[in-house]
Image (cartoon, grey):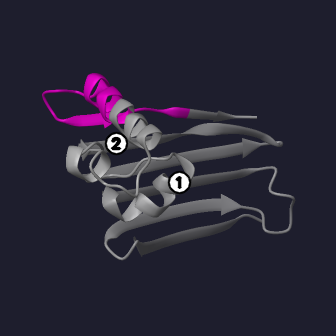
Amino acid sequence: RDAEFKGKARLLGHADLESTARFDPFSNFEDFDFRLRATGIQLKKLNDFSSAYAKFDFNAGDGDVVIEAQANKGQLSGYIKPLLRNVDVFNWQQDVQNKDKGVFRSIWEALVGTSETVLKNQRENQFATRVDLSG
């Protein structure tokens, strides 16, 4: 009784998004396969989200994200893999000289920007990680 979903859309009005899923719509979703790929995400468009939840914003950059998740008898496995390119988080004028931002917020953005610079692939000017899902 598996159903299959395939879809394409625009994320945030500009990024290509493709998704597929296979599941039994009459079950409790204990068994499913899910895949999602979004490409060409302009990171500045995520500033409301990143500002609210991570307390920093993007000055520039773009990225892709891939999500693959499976459940087998209620056991979840998979990963989330963002790939960020040409990321700029800290800007002296925007983050330090801006009177609307507090000093601690400016320090945090400087730390995030420095961490991204240290961890990225310098040759390709990109930063990638993988977050495993299980449970």
Classify 124 as above or below 29: above
Residue 128 screen position, x and y as percent:
35, 34
Membership of 94 in magenta stretch: no
Give the residue displayed 60% in from the left and 54% down from the top: 34
For the magenta stretch, what is the residue range? 112-131
Give the residue displayed 28% in from the left and 22% down from the top: 118
Residue 39 screen position, x and y as percent:
33, 58
The quarter of the picture where the C terminus appears is: top right
Residue at numbered disc 1: 35
Q: CA distance from mark 1 to mark 2?
A: 16 Å
Q: Say whether disc 1 or disc 2 marks the residue closer to the N-terminus.
A: 1
Is 89 positioned to the left or the right of 48 in the image? left
Q: State yes or no: discs 1 and 2 in contact (Cβ < 8 Å).
A: no
- Number of other residues with Cα within 10 Å of mark 2, as a class: few under 14, some 14 to 19, many 20 or more: some
The quarter of the picture where the N terminus appears is: bottom right
Classify 8 as above or below 111: below
Q: What is the quadrant of residue 110 in the picture?
A: top left
Is 63 positioned to the left or the right of 26 in the image? left
* Residue type for callout 2: Leu
- Of residue 7 and residue 107, the one placed in the foreground of this image is 107
Q: What is the quadrant of residue 47 in the picture?
A: bottom left
Residue at numbered disc 2: 83
